[in-house]
Amino acid sequence: MATKSAPAGRQVRQSPAQDFPRPFTTVDVLILTVLEDALKVLLVQRPSGASEPFPGQWALPGGYVDIAVDDDLEACARRKLQEKTAVASPYLEQLGSWGSAMRDPRGWSATHAYFALIAAHGLEITKGANAAAVAWFGVDEVLMPPASPVPLAFDHADILRAGVERLRSKVEYTSLPAFLLPEPFTLPQLQRTYEVVLGRPVDKSGFRTRMMAADFLEEVGVVDSHANRPPMGYRLKDRTAPVFFPRTFSPRR
Amino acid sequence: MATKSAPAGRQVRQSPAQDFPRPFTTVDVLILTVLEDALKVLLVQRPSGASEPFPGQWALPGGYVDIAVDDDLEACARRKLQEKTAVASPYLEQLGSWGSAMRDPRGWSATHAYFALIAAHGLEITKGANAAAVAWFGVDEVLMPPASPVPLAFDHADILRAGVERLRSKVEYTSLPAFLLPEPFTLPQLQRTYEVVLGRPVDKSGFRTRMMAADFLEEVGVVDSHANRPPMGYRLKDRTAPVFFPRTFSPRR
DNA sequence: CCAATAGTGTCTGTTAGACAATATACA
DNA sequence: TGTATATTGTCTAACAGACACTATTGG
């Protein structure tokens, strides 16, 4: 919001300062969901051409910023998200950036990582244009030490680890897990999602009072049940941002 | 509005997949301190050459990644930090990245922003190599709406705003302000620092029990005082990372 | 009736927040 | 002694955590 805008007309193509060789710039997206009571990440298989780095290995969806198409980094991330899933407007947050001389064998590169939370639903995963395989993997499996059964390309394991850590810590004091469920969802479902992400049980009564006190849910009528009391269905009042709880979940040790 | 001239002709050597024209890559550093009971940011004046963007305006210290010198993004940030201040190992955290077609008149660019917390002390600010002016500015002054008395170059006001917001929110539940003080510091000094960053008073007794419970301070002997009870001096047990408090500061409303 | 899950009530130990009281320096 | 700041103590209302209890469906 710098009020003074520079004259926009000026087109400098080659100011001396730009003689620096440019690193190449990519965007990677961490697409997370909860499926089968586990936190999962969407991975794509890299092309197998001999000149490609990490041929055939699994990697985060992503790729070069296309300055002819992408207005900004977030638009680029949304484009790549759209290419793999048909999800229109998921929760999307910038995770950080990773850049170094060594992370890509082709040269100095920097990637801007985003993470998206989506509802797995009956979601169709669309194969990439180049028919590359796309699939969900349990994050704990992918990150299993010391040797992952699914070794990721580049430094994508670092990025995944950072994303999962960020999610787990934010879940302690935000409503983020609600973005992992399709609407309408019930409070028991939401609680289960919290438990899956946190990896520990959560007290029912306390959970419910917390959620209601945060005032971010909207009743949308009871949902069907099979052989017991039918639960109330809810949806988010605001799907663009999570709410922050004043206290962390369970500091008890 | 993305479809502007994007000549793919800008050839880049190396492997085929990299025919994308590369955005240029910079790193900017938000150097923050508390001085004269106010949160301040270090700004540098841009060169005044006619071919330079935003000539003479104030900006965050930063610049191009030099792939011949910088091993990774953080090393680049530390280098730029070192160029302006002589501070060896301040607290340094990645803030985020900003990239778009419009933020720099010279073309599609992406910057990786870091923020550093340093003790102002009797710190010597070193003028840049090109003798550019360097100075501290109160962040509230720089960000004053609707028209800042110190309009920043590029989208640096956005970056500053994001950094200050991040700091203010983290201060609610971390020991970050301790990195803004020279060691040894006293609890009243630390409390004052919290109050300056948060912009509101903090209860003395509660503050102290909180700090002691977090167990991140080390006594280092009483420090001189002028005409009253001399306070205890402390230093950080670990200068590399802040501690997180289990609860936010004052949810009272 | 029972089984199973949804949802609410109750009790209790802990603690944040307000503020009062005390400690220690110097003049 | 008084003054100024540092540091500790006390009281209370609020609340998290544990868990028991009630509610509502189908069979």
Image (spheres, coloured by chain):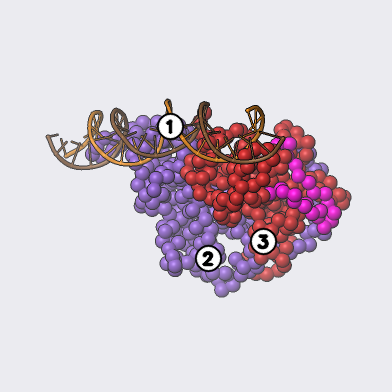
Chain colours: A purple, B red, C brown, D orange
Tell me the tag on residue B75.
Answer: 3
Say if residue A17 shows up in the picture.
yes
How packed is label 1: few (under 14 Cα within 10 Å), some, or many (20 or more)? few
Q: Which of the two discs, 2 and 1, sits closer to the camera?
A: 1
Classify mark 1: helix, strand or loop. Answer: helix
Residue at mark 1: A213
Classify mark 2: helix, strand or loop. Answer: loop
Q: Nearer the viewer, residue D11 or A132?
A: D11
Residue B32 in the magenta stretch? The answer is no
Q: Which of the two labelled residues, at mark 2 and mark 1, occupies the earlier sequence position? A: 2
- Distance from label 3 to label 1 (Cα)? 44 Å
Tell me the tag on residue A153.
Answer: 2
Residue located 75% across and 34% down the image: B147
Look at label 3 and name its amino acid.
Ala
* Residue D16 location (% of width, % of height): 40, 38
User: Disc 3 sits on a residue from what chain?
Assistant: B
- Distance from label 2 to label 1 (Cα)? 43 Å
Say if residue A78 shows up in the picture.
no
Residue located 46% across and 55% down the image: A41
Look at label 1 and name its amino acid.
Ala
* Residue B136 location (% of width, % of height): 76, 44
Classify mark 3: helix, strand or loop. Answer: helix
Query: Magenta part of the protein: which range?
Result: B119-141
Q: Is residue A208 left or right of residue C18?
A: left
Q: Nearer the viewer, residue A40 or A249?
A: A249
Q: Is residue C26 left or right of residue A211?
A: right
How packed is label 2: few (under 14 Cα within 10 Å), some, or many (20 or more)? some
Look at label 2 and name its amino acid.
Ala
Q: Which of the two discs, 2 and 3, sits closer to the camera?
A: 3
